[in-house]
Image: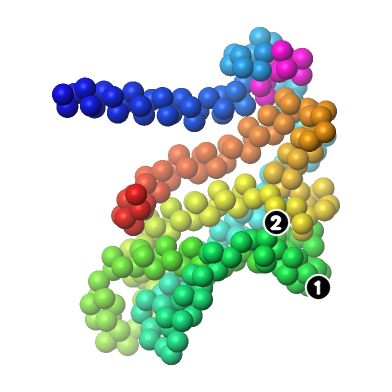
């Protein structure tokens, strides 16, 4: 009976994996098809006449390497900013006592429930006044602090015994050394996993960069992809699939490299 249950779960897992992977396979397959083949045999996984022309055309039409660098650079700035501010804030909330701490913490956490559309226009006006339009800093600045990161790092710090921190404080060791030499090494798996999630989210971000970046030389990959997708028809499907394939390479590599840290962090945090 147990073997039947296990085989049933394995079968269900395989079905779910296939459902999730099929769109990716179709996307990669169509990126190697001609325009005619992509419309006539869209659901054919193996291209009848495989070609690299779509990737070569992309390289000619847009500054592909520059756009990839723009996306990587912006995602890196945002990720580092969120990790640094999240760690510092979580450390302060965890190990310092100050007036109004709970109120300030709940004020931070409450920003999670504020829709992005509410703060989008005020953020745009501030960035415009600072003359940061069409810049990586203009995209990154409003995103350098994230309440979700603070909450996740605070949860991760629960596994550090308070007695350890208190014993070190008795020796008058500065807080920045405690953070650098004790807290950060212990939380390294959590930092890696949370940072990977932040990076992937920033890499795929579209709405906010659309408002800030108008110069094509400053575009990110999601913005460049929009040039090949038209709601009124005329979409160059193979080129769009080729650019989409390029877009998923870096997030996929990050997930594959840090998969162990991400899964361990999720399981240790008690998330189901």
Q: Is residue 13 above or below residue 115?
A: above
**What is the count of numbered marks?**
2
In the image, 59 versus 264, the foreground residue is 264
Mark pair 1, 2: CA separation: 16 Å
Magenta highlight on residue 105: no
**Residue 51 - label:** none
Q: Residue at x 68, y 60 (%)?
A: 117
Residue 229 relative to residue 11: left or right: right
Q: Residue furthest top?
A: 48
In the image, 83 versus 6, the foreground residue is 6
Q: Secondary structure at mark 1?
A: helix
Q: Residue at x 78, y 27 (%)?
A: 236
Task: Provide the residue span drawn in magenta.
Answer: 30-40
Q: If you read the primary sequence from the N terminus, does the residue marked by circle 1 or circle 2 appear first?
A: 1
**Secondary structure mostly taken by the magenta-highlighted segment of the chain:** helix
Q: Residue at x 80, y 62 (%)?
A: 133
Tell me the residue that label 2 is attached to: 208
Residue 189 relative to residue 115: left or right: left
Q: Is residue 47 above or below residue 72?
A: above
x and y percentages locating residue 77 in the rendered image? 61, 60
> Would you say residue 203 is visible in this rendering?
yes
x and y percentages locating residue 122 in the rendered image? 73, 70
Q: Residues within 10 Å of mark 1 (few under 14, many from 20)?
A: few
**In the picture, which quadrant includes the N terminus?**
top left
Quadrant hosting residue 124 = bottom right
**Residue 129 - label:** 1
x and y percentages locating residue 79 in the rendered image? 56, 58
């Amino acid at each position: 009976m147990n073997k039947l249950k296990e085989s049933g779960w394995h079968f269900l897992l395989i079905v779910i994996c296939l459902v999730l992977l099929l769109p990716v396979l179709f996307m990669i397959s169509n990126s190697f098809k001609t325009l005619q083949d992509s419309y006539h045999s869209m659901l054919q996984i193996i291209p009848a006449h495989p070609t690299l022309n779509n990737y070569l055309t992309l390289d000619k039409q847009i500054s592909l390497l520059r756009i990839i660098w723009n996306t990587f650079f912006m995602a890196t700035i945002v990720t580092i900013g969120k990790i640094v501010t999240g760690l510092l804030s979580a450390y302060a909330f965890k190990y310092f006592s100050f007036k109004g701490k709970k109120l300030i913490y709940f004020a931070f956490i409450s920003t999670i429930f504020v829709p992005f559309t509410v703060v989008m226009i005020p953020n745009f006006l501030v960035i415009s006044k600072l003359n940061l339009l069409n810049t990586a800093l203009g995209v990154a600045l409003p995103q350098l602090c994230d309440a979700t990161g603070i909450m996740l790092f605070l949860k991760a710090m629960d596994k550090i015994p308070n007695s350890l921190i208190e014993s070190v404080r008795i020796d008058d060791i500065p807080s920045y050394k405690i953070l650098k030499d004790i807290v950060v090494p212990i939380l390294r798996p959590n930092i890696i996993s949370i940072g990977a999630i932040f990076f992937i989210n920033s890499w795929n971000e579209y709405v906010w960069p659309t408002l800030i970046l108008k110069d094509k030389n400053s575009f990110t990959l999601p913005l460049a992809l929009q040039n090949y997708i038209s709601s009124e028809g005329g979409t160059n499907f193979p080129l769009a699939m080729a650019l989409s394939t390029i877009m998923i390479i870096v997030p996929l590599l990050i997930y594959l490299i840090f998969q162990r840290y991400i899964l361990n962090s999720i399981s240790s945090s008690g998330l189901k």
